[in-house]
Image: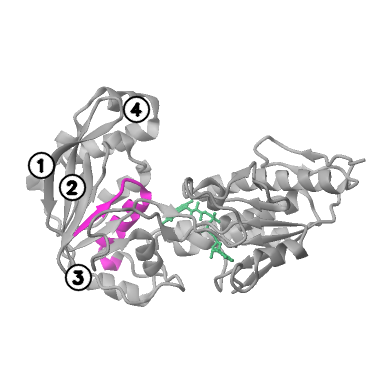
Amino acid sequence: MPRRLHLRGRSDGRAATAGDGVTIELSVAIVGAGPAGVHAAGALSELAPGTRIDIFERLPAPYGLVRHGIAPDHPARVTKLTGELRAVLAGSGARLFCGVEIGTDVTVRDLRNRYDAVVIATGARRDVPVELPGLNLPGSFGAADFVAWYSGHPDASPAWTLRAESVAVIGAGNVALDVIRMLSKPAYALAGTGIPLHVLNEFAASPVRDIHLFARRGPADTRFSPTELGELGDQDDVDVIVDPADLAPDLHMERMTRQFAPTRKVVDILRAWSRIPAAARTASRRVHLHFYRIPAAVLGVDRVQGLRTERAVPDGYGHITGSGDYEDHKVQAVYRAIGYAVSPLAGVPFDPGTRTVPHRAGAVLGEPGLYVTGWAKRGCIGLVGATRADTFQTARTLLQDHVRERGTDHA
Ligand SMILES: Cc1cc2nc3c(=O)[nH]c(=O)nc-3n(C[C@H](O)[C@H](O)[C@H](O)COP(=O)(O)OP(=O)(O)OC[C@H]3O[C@@H](n4cnc5c(N)ncnc54)[C@H](O)[C@@H]3O)c2cc1C
């Protein structure tokens, strides 16, 4: 009769330890050595010491988007998170195999035949697909490609030309802010951050003067974090321009700013920028933040020459409708930062609607012994801290299933 594994700890799993005298004979393969894969190894070794863990990573080095996603002008953050992941990896006793792509070099089926359990932690590296006329014109880019280029991702071609004086960025989250900061920041402020030299040289040669962000909805509906937003205004030689009309209060904005402190801070920062008189703007680069603008088309014949947006009308309850009023903005490049998307992995179920691996508490539906964690599980949202918490849920589910199925004696 199956006996139970005693797992002790707080409900968030942080202080969880294996029960007295627990040893589990269990082998686990983890696919992906990003934050989720590394923390999954940490969670398994903490909850069930002695678990044999192998991590397979397609790139030559671990840590996923922490290495190839976090903007290089945040070097302290990269160093801190990398140091934490390194410590978790070392403490877990896991073996790390880099340069092995699961699905290509080895199949998921192979892993499932050789290990008791397989955890998918493959994260994301592509832009979410969007449909917009003109999107395929030269000069129209996805943020994921741009991020991969400036962070020296091995998949990214080193060739990227920054030749636009006016740029549009579509999106209202922190990746859009990263893109704007990287485009607007003076190159000297990037030197010494670990940014690849060919990238630094390209930023130094960039003729950009005006960067326009277009958000579909209002200031209270952005996904900006206040710190990241505030950083835009702290840069040398960059003015941030916001039209006060976009900040006209309505019931929805009042409710959101009352209820959510980060939203209040975001709106306060935007209001402060909207009050800066035009005469005080003397910087050589300008960031314009536009709200209630629905992207309608990327314009151009053989390359990007503009972006058409439609004015959105808020209804005061958090919804918008198109007004039928269109504006054309003259830009030579368009960056879309609408979000990242998980890519399907052969041998692993995939829900094209949510673009995630379907699961219950981390157990992949209909696939015993297969688990998922991180962005592949939750979708492409959330910081590394959220990913860590989520790995504990998956690890607990895996261990409980193992005990149930094998009847392992842990009591
Ligand atoms: C532009 C950007 C900036 C960000 N900035 C911050 C920030 O400042 N602070 C913060 O806390 N969070 C930040 N985040 C969020 C953070 O990066 C994610 O929360 C976190 O990386 C998700 O972890 P993950 O392990 O699920 O995915 P990933 O980080 O994507 O890791 C997945 C790993 O799996 C590997 N892999 C994929 N497929 C295979 C395969 N078939 N075989 C083997 N290996 C495979 C990948 O190479 C990668 O190493 C940022 C995200 C982005 C996109």
Q: Determine crowd level at label 3: few under 14, some 14-19, many 20+ residues with C-alpha closer than 10 A.
A: some
Separation (CA) of disc 1 from disc 2: 26 Å
On the picture, is 243 further left or further right than 124?
left
Tell me if I can see residue 275 in this picture.
no
Front-most of residues 60 and 87:
60
Q: Which residues are magenta?
A: 167-188
Eyeballing the image, is 71 above or below 288? below
Q: Residue at x 41, y 72 (%)?
A: 156
Separation (CA) of disc 2 from disc 4: 25 Å
Separation (CA) of disc 1 from disc 3: 30 Å
Q: Earlier in the sequence, mark 1 or mark 2?
A: 1
Q: Determine crowd level at label 4: few under 14, some 14-19, many 20+ residues with C-alpha closer than 10 A.
A: some
Q: Residue at x 40, y 63 (%)?
A: 72
- Residue furthest right in the image: 1
Q: Position of residue 355 (x, y in %)?
A: 49, 50
Q: Position of residue 381 (x, y in %)?
A: 46, 47
Separation (CA) of disc 4 from disc 1: 27 Å
On the picture, is 255 further left or further right than 77?
left
User: Which residue, given by chain and number where applicable, does mark 1 sit on?
Assistant: 277
Amino acid type, residue under disc 3 in the picture: Arg
Q: Is residue 170 magenta?
A: yes
User: Which residue, given by chain and number where applicable, does mark 4 sit on?
Assistant: 256
User: Which residue, given by chain and number where applicable, does mark 2 sit on?
Assistant: 309
User: Which residue, given by chain and number where applicable, does mark 3 sit on?
Assistant: 163
Front-most of residues 254 and 82:
254
Amino acid type, residue under disc 2 in the picture: Thr
Q: Position of residue 227 (x, y in %)?
A: 37, 45
Q: Earlier in the sequence, mark 1 or mark 3?
A: 3
Eyeballing the image, is 378 above or below 37? above
Q: Earlier in the sequence, mark 4 or mark 1?
A: 4
Q: Secondary structure at mark 4?
A: helix
Counting the numbered discs, the total is 4
